[in-house]
Image (cartoon, helix red, strand yellow):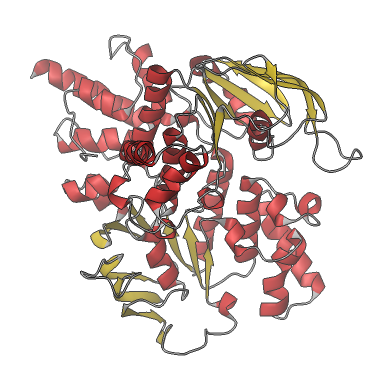
Amino acid sequence: MVKIELDSITFRYGDRRRAPLFAELSLTIAAGEWVGLVGPSGAGKTTLLKVMKGLLRPEAGEVRVNGAPLHELNSLAAFVFANPENQIVSPVVGEDVGFALEQAGLDLDTIRRRAEQALRRVGLWERARDLSHNLSGGEQQRLILAGALALRARCLLLDDPLSMVDGHARRDLLALLAEIREEEGCSLVQTTHLLDEVVNVSRVVALERGRVVFDGPPATFFREASLIDALGLEVPPLVRLGEELKRANLMAGREIMSSRQLLGLLGVAEGRRAD
Amino acid sequence: MLKAMDISHTFDPRSAPLRWALRCVTVAVEAGAAVLITGSSGSGKTTLARIMAGLERPTQGVVRLRSEDLYSRKQRPSPPSAHVAMAFQYPERQFFADTVWDELSWGLRAGMGWDEEPIRARLAKVAEELELPLEAVARRSPRQLSSGQQRKVALVSLLALEPQVLILDEPLTGLNAKERRRLATLLRRRLRQDRAMVVIAHELELFLPWATTVAVLAGGRLAFRGSPQDLVTTADPAVLAAVSLPPLMEISSSLKRHALSEGPVSNDVAVVLDQVRRAVEERGSR
């Protein structure tokens, strides 16, 4: 279980003449939480994740991981960059997943077993022997996620990890994130531009110009219409439909979480594809 | 205007058996039209886009811009910017200059031989349309910008060139909802100026309403080519597996396929709400 505390941190890019991106910002990620970090481009979402990983150091304030001040890299957290190309280190898919495990000094059998398991979970096992650079953008994002899963990190810091992944795979990967949180108690902090990715998170944190402007459950966030608009975001149409269905008392008060679920309730569930 | 005919491509011509990234794919786009290419991750979308942009010689097949074969000559047509321009999935792949200003102005200056004043005017206009704060970022390195701003810089540099054919690989990545809508509107407006466009996207919501043709790739083959209306009403399982419709359209389309709705396949909350209401009533009476 991993808890991350940002205690009154101040951070700026460049010299002191420039305004700080964050001034005395405090935020605690509790163990086992799934936090969706949203806000306009340039609001500081990626920077905040990098501070949590220890890749960037605040000029004032303290970062604590499980109560201990962070002085080096946060070894309990795995980071997934927005651009997977910046993170792929091996020319072969299977080897890339094993790389960090090898660095961690694990034996070959364990590395192979964990790499296979992780690649299967993201639906890339069939591509294990392929060249990493021949993967599509969406597949590369899945590969990086597999690397983080294989490490069995207790905390994942995910920077827009599904931006290039197609709809069906995106749905499966969101379900996978929910699963590792529930089964393994993994803490997740995930940035995104699309609010349909935060429907199932435990907590939404909205940033605007380096300030936290919302902190609460997604259902409450979705009711903040004017704030959502000001942040350049949109309530997912499915959430709006779900609200309308509830208002019309059509689905016996059930929360609508996905189009598949609604179709299932209507008795028209259809298998789309096996993976 | 731009036609890719019977394209097959492999990245490893010596492998046996050959593994085709693309197999016998034909896609064409006319002036004033937009082709939307979609399909799952790894289905060959980006490869096809690169081939159509003149960036990757296909193993087999021909790409013609008007009557000219893009790959017949040893050298690329010059200036490339005036004809076919491609925005990559990763914007930073296209960056080469140290400042945003150099990055944006290079094509107009070096490629088209423009002077400083008209360059300034053109860039200011396009940057404003995409809400890129040009003044604030002009002297910074494009690599230091946030992913959303990088995307905007890449798009502004290409849109400013007004190429005859614009090829966009997942242009919405990194942008938020409002920025996405703004970009889609801007692209749609380009069509009226008789420009051609090829859009690669896995999210279809903002493109289906105005795409002329949709092509669906599955495992490197063309699984579907037709109008957006035909796509959203198709019952072909191979196409349904390769395409992810926006959630409301998926509901609307599914209800129609199961004869629970007679209405149009829609992405509008009120329309789909009504269709669901009727489906509930219909089911109750069955």
Report how many numbered discs are placed on residues in the image: 0
Q: What residue is rendered at 43% in x and 33% in y?
A: A149
Q: Is residue A97 left or right of residue A157?
A: left
Query: Picture quarter containing residue B215?
Result: bottom left
The answer, for residue A23, to whether it is visible in the render is no
Q: Is residue B34 above or below residue A12?
A: below
* Camera-side residue of B78 and B51: B51
Q: Is residue B201 above or below residue A25?
A: below
Q: Is residue B54 left or right of residue B63?
A: right
Query: Picture quarter containing residue A64?
Result: top right
Q: What residue is rendered at 37% in x and 40% in y?
A: A115
Q: Is residue B172 above or below residue B93?
A: above
Residue A275 in the image, given as x and y percentages of width and height: 24, 39
Q: Is residue B265 above or below residue B163?
A: above
Residue B18 in the image, given as x and y percentages of width and height: 24, 70
Q: What residue is rendered at 46% in x and 65% in y?
A: B197
Q: Residue furthest right?
A: A17
Residue A71 in the image, given as x and y percentages of width and height: 73, 28
* Camera-side residue of B280 and A231: A231
* Camera-side residue of B202 and A94: A94
The answer, for residue B94, to whether it is visible in the render is yes
Q: What residue is rendered at 56% in x and 72% in y?
A: B163
Residue A85 in the image, given as x and y percentages of width and height: 52, 53
Q: Residue furthest bottom?
A: B73
Q: Is residue A144 left or right of residue B125?
A: left
Query: Picture quarter containing residue A196?
Result: top left
Q: Residue furthest left?
A: B286
